[in-house]
Amino acid sequence: MSAIITAQNLEKIYIRGSEKIVAVDKVSLSLEEGEFVSFVGPSGSGKTTLLHLLGCLDNPTSGSLSIGDISVFADNKSISEQKLTKIRRNNFGYIFQKFYLIPTLTVKENILLPYAFYKNPSANTTAEELAERLGLSHRLSHLPKELSGGEMQRVAIARALINKPNILLADEPTGNLDSKRSMEIAAILSELNREDGITIILVTHNPALAEVANTTVHLQDGKVIG
């Protein structure tokens, strides 16, 4: 298998007044296609910041990052925003702790949201297939307020999958769910990795959820410690 994400000495520094905050401290890692990796560590350890860097949602301060054979950031320079947008659209699906569903849109419309600005003739069929797979077929015409927390997160997962990504980034996807619903989401992620070969990077405080991954990366103070 080939590396799908490669980071070398990745660093993210924030300046707040006179304070310098090193959120990610010279992290190097390589993820292969089809891996399922969990990032664990205490609050403030840099898990989410690192996830955002790897997912091209933020630029590092220094270091290098490649997605497949495309160099995204090197020599303190990033590729253009237009190219970054294309990389995000073609490679990544994003799941967050907050569901970020549009309250006035139906489940189907929320799933199709990534295609609001990009026409795709097969999008409707894909949305319906994803809804069936995730047990949401009977909810397609419903509004978010009519759904349970677990159902809303499944809608968010379907939305993340609508563009058929090869990398799925999940930032505390069960943070707002009870233990039963959390393990349902864990089972979905495991199936997507096992059956579809999607590379998954998961940030979690939940030990049971972290164990679903094949590899666990421990972070502390912005550094990989194991």
Image (spheres, rainbow, N blue to C red):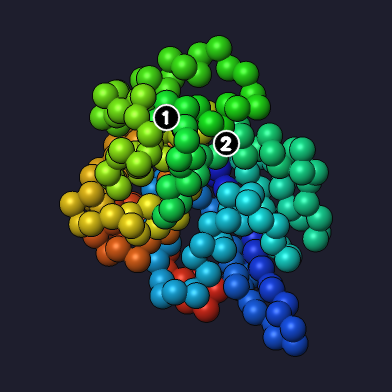
Q: Residues within 10 Å of mark 1 (few under 14, many from 20)?
A: some
Q: Inspect the image, locate mark 2, and give the three-letter code of the amino acid beneath it.
A: Asn
- Taking the spot 54% from the left edge, 53% from the top edge, the residue there is 30
- Asked whether 35 or 116 is in front, the reply is 116
Task: Give the mark nearest the N terminus, 2 or 1.
Answer: 2
Res. 106 mark: 1
Q: Is residue 211 left or right of residue 56?
A: left
- Asked whether 96 or 169 is in front, the reply is 96
Q: Inspect the image, locate mark 1, and give the three-letter code of the amino acid beneath it.
A: Thr
Please say if 134 is above or below 45.
above
Single out the residue that lies furthest toward the left. Answer: 180
List the residue tagged with mark 2: 91
Res. 223 mark: none
- Asked whether 40 or 114 is in front, the reply is 114
* Distance from Cα at disc 2 to Cα at disc 1: 26 Å
Measured as percent of width and height from the top left, residue 85 is found at 69, 39
Q: Secondary structure at mark 2?
A: helix
Single out the residue that lies furthest toward the top. Answer: 121
Measured as percent of width and height from the top left, residue 56 is found at 64, 49
